[in-house]
Amino acid sequence: MIFDCGTCQRMFPAGCKARDQHCEATGHSPPAFECDTCCFYFDDEHDRRDHMNLEDHWALDAAECSLCYFRAPTAQEVKHHEFGHHFYCGECNREFQNLNNIHQHLKSRRHQGSGVTCPFCEVAYGTATGLVYHLEGGSCPRAPLNRDKMYRVIRERDPNGVISIKSLEWYGDRIFEINPTDAWNSQCEAFECYLCHRIFGTLYGLRSHLASPKHQQKLYHCPCQTCNKEFVTLAALINHLESESCRFMRFQQVQTNIKNIVSSNRIIEFQFQPM
């Protein structure tokens, strides 16, 4: 591919790396609306996105909607898309019936409270659920954690099985292999998950789905003896407790207890007043 300099229009048949080295040395810039993957560039952002959607040329780290194939350069834009198009709150993993309902939810104490600070990188999150998503998703630059590593830590500190499933035989996250030919559904002209039969427009979308916790083992349970719901992630368990649906503890008490769970070396226990 021949890449262009957006400032002096010089062409680089050697490829993107040569063009980028030129820009770094001269202070020049790539074309303003260049594709994330190929050498094409466009007059505006709308045309650039149309091309990348059509050719599946988004960067591998592009933010992607949790509910559809929408992608964008920033996570904030995807968040606004999920709010406006799906009435979905990613931080709480909840869908709402209409725009008014999600607006009311965003005004609630979950999102208007003082928030919870990550004990490692000190970034503030609106809720304990948001903090745990941050850690389990491997997003914290100062804590090399993910769902797998987080569970190892929790299990060691939870010998009484307060929140971890004690009887579980666990050997780490399952890794799913994909054969693109076998995964292709010619009737739908899309890729199909062989576990849940969900359809994906791109192989990248299917790979992201199988790399997510969606089809992993349930590792946690609600500490309420009359509930005992099981969860794939710690974030899902914390979100359940924050909802107060089983009346085990109040929302604010979850925020108070979360640091004992994610950053302490003590045995896991909850300090709260029963509802």
Image (spheres, rainbow, N blue to C red):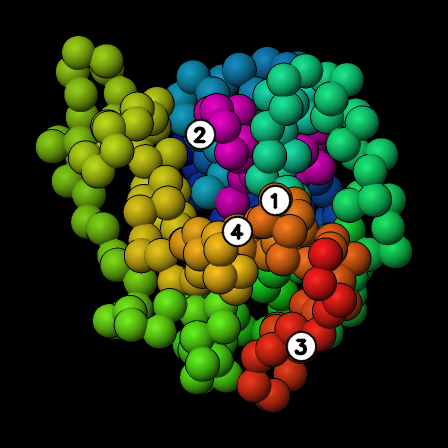
Q: Residue at x 17, y 11 (%)?
A: 187
Magenta-drawn stretch contains 265:
no
Give percent across and percent down for residue 224: 53, 60
Q: Earlier in the sequence, mark 4 or mark 2?
A: 2
Q: Quadrant of residue 81?
A: top right
Q: Amino acid at mark 3?
A: Asn
For disc 4, the marked residue is 236
Mark identifier at residue 113:
none
Asked whether 239 or 42 is in front, the reply is: 239
- Stretch of the chain drawn in magenta: 61-81
Mark identifier at residue 245:
1
Mark 3 neighbour density, 10 Å: few (under 14) some (14–19) many (20 or more): some
Asked whether 73 or 42 is in front, the reply is: 73
Quarter that holds the C terminus: bottom right
Q: Residue at x 38, y 34 (%)?
A: 205
For disc 2, the marked residue is 57
Instruction: Give the structural element (helix, strand or loop) at label 2.
Output: loop
For disc 3, the marked residue is 260
Give percent across and percent down for residue 75: 65, 40
Is label 3 or label 2 in front? 3
Magenta-drawn stretch contains 70:
yes
1 and 4 marks in contact (CB < 8 Å) = no
Give percent across and percent down for residue 203: 30, 33
Q: Is the residue 150 above or below the residue 65 in the image?
A: below
Q: Earlier in the sequence, mark 3 or mark 1?
A: 1
Mark 2 neighbour density, 10 Å: few (under 14) some (14–19) many (20 or more): some
Q: CA distance from mark 1 to mark 4?
A: 13 Å
Q: Earlier in the sequence, mark 4 or mark 3?
A: 4
Q: CA distance from mark 3 to mark 2?
A: 43 Å
Q: Is the residue 223 above or below the residue 191 in the image?
A: below
Q: CA distance from mark 4 to mark 3?
A: 17 Å
